[in-house]
Image (spheres, grey):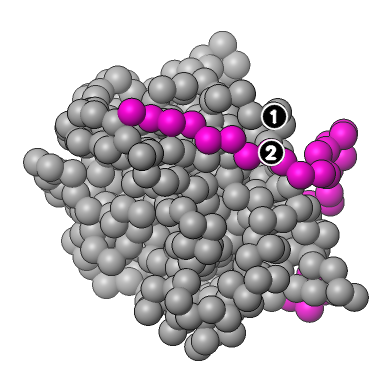
């Protein structure tokens, strides 16, 4: 059994900063519980990190940016952990190269769990002393909570990448019964937006990353947005029509990647006896035609949109559409580990905006007008990555509850597809 975090607050404190901190810490251990020590150490590719590293890195964040700075007399658990578990913070010194995190067989998983317990105990001391009431401490704790939630999703997607590479194709969790599920075609509707001057970006009230600010005005031309995500069945039509073999559909860089890496289907898909299956956290499963396609790169999403005679939405268009009906298409029920088919016929409202798959947009990941990175080490969190990547909007079935919002800007390189990445179509309104 994995060593558990301590100092969980009583249920009557639900909603407080202290409760949310320790509940987030507990949820990370819950996600790691099905894994063996061997599962937690292996790194299957450069983009992914071992589960053990994720658990230690988020702990290092609290130790480095909160406890070592604000808790008098705090004792570092192990000074060597700064090298092992720093991610990309140049201000914090040298670190283990990202592609080689899997060679860290030491410290052991049990020592990482002991590290978490040590840091949790110190965080409890910080709260007992009332130090969290300092505005700066409170702000950094909030960042730490949201940072750990990001790594919870990464932990799951990295485990999927690991298990997909294993010839046994183990399941992270057995398939859960979900009652009656849609198997037939899923009707597609279109929603018209008149355009105009709109405000996008976070305007205050609740947590947001610095890259979601400042709120600003944008000009949006009239457009149409698909009311649901592109499905596996539609992707199969793209494949059958030679989508991966038609150069005219692809951006030049994308076409190079297709031919270099031999892409012929979304990541984790394979044919068995003529039928397509896809590896998931519930093991290999038949591809469900009505469910949203996912694990596709920006290059693939863009090529599909061209094939369909449409385009990907701008992130400003997506945000305006989502803000118009914020209560529609919320997260999937807790424990659902794959995107599900749209649950209702078209009704003129957007479906599957959140909780199914992150949605590629046409927008490059760039700073908003008047954007300024945060001061200090936390300024390295977002700003220095604003080149060469594309924005995704929404959230996925693996995004922790409470970690989604209309203004959230996710970002990845256009060739990456190991995250739960899908797409919805858009077009001009003429």
Residue 4 visible in the current orientation: no
Given residues 120 and 188, the one toward you in this image is 188
Chief secondary structure of the magenta portion: loop
Whether residue 120 sits left or right of residue 333 in the image: it is left
189 is within the stretch colored magenta: yes
- Vertical order, 263 against 36 (above or below): below
Q: Position of residue 178 (x, y in %)?
A: 83, 36
Q: Position of residue 129 (x, y in %)?
A: 33, 23
Give the residues drawn in magenta, as a range: 166-194
Indicate which disc, 2 or 1, sits on the residue closer to the N terminus: 2
364 in relation to 413, above or below:
above
Q: Residue at x 52, y 87 (%)?
A: 259
The structure residue drawn at horizontal position 59% and vertical position 35%, both measured from the top left corner, is 189
User: In this picture, is 50 found above or below 137?
Assistant: below
The crowding category of the residue bearing disc 2, from other C-alpha atoms within 10 Å (few below 14, some 14 to 19, many at least 20), is: few
**Total number of numbered discs in the rendering:** 2
The quarter in which the C terminus is drawn is top left
Q: Which mark is residue 152?
A: none
Q: Can residue 306 be spotted in the picture?
A: yes
Residue 149 image position (x, y, % from top left): 48, 42
The answer for how far apart the CA atoms under marks 2 and 1 are is 6 Å
Q: Is residue 217 left or right of residue 427?
A: left
Nearest the camera: 383 or 242? 242
Q: Which mark is residue 187?
A: 2
- Relative side of 90 to 416, left or right: left
Give residue 346's quadrant in the image. Answer: top right
Is the C-beta separation of discs 2 and 1 under 8 Å?
yes
Q: Which mark is residue 345?
A: 1
């Amino acid at each position: 059994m994995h060593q558990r975090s301590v100092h969980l607050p009583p249920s009557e404190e639900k909603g407080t900063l202290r409760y949310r901190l320790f509940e987030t810490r507990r949820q990370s251990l819950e996600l790691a519980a099905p894994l063996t020590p061997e599962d937690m150490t292996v790194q299957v590719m450069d983009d992914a990190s071992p589960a053990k590293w994720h658990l230690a890195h988020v702990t290092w964040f609290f130790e480095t940016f909160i406890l070592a700075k604000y808790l008098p007399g705090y004792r570092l658990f192990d000074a060597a952990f700064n090298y092992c578990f720093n991610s990309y913070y140049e201000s914090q010194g040298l670190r283990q190269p990202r592609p080689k995190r899997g060679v860290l067989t030491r410290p052991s998983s049990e020592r990482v769990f002991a590290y978490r317990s040590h840091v949790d105990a110190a965080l409890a001391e910080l709260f007992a002393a009332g130090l969290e009431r300092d505005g700066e401490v409170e702000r950094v704790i909030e960042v730490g909570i949201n940072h750990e939630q990001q790594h919870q999703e990464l932990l799951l997607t990295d485990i999927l990448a690991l298990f997909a590479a294993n010839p046994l194709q183990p399941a992270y969790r057995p398939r859960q019964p979900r009652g009656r599920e849609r198997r037939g075609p899923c009707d597609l509707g279109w929603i018209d937006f008149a355009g105009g001057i709109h405000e996008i970006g976070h305007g205050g009230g609740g947590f947001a990353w610095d890259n979601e600010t400042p709120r600003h005005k944008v000009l949006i031309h009239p457009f149409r947005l698909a009311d649901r995500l592109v499905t596996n069945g539609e992707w199969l039509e793209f494949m059958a029509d030679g989508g991966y073999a038609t150069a005219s559909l692809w951006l030049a860089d994308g076409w190079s990647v297709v031919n270099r890496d031999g892409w012929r289907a979304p990541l984790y898909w394979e044919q068995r006896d003529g039928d397509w299956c896809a590896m998931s956290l519930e093991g290999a499963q038949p591809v469900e035609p009505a469910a949203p396609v996912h694990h596709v790169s920006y290059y693939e999403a863009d090529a599909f949109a061209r094939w369909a005679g449409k385009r990907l939405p701008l992130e400003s268009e997506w945000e305006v559409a989502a803000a118009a009906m914020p209560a529609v298409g919320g997260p999937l029920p807790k424990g659902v580990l794959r995107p599900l088919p749209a649950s209702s016929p078209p009704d003129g409202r957007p479906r599957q905006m959140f909780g199914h798959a992150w949605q590629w947009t046409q927008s490059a990941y760039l700073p908003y007008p008047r954007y300024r990175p945060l001061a200090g080490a936390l300024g390295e969190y977002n700003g220095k990555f604003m080149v060469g990547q594309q924005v995704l909007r929404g959230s996925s079935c693996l995004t922790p509850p409470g970690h989604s919002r209309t203004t959230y800007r996710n970002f990845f390189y256009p060739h990456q597809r190991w995250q739960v990445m899908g797409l919805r179509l858009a077009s001009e309104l003429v």
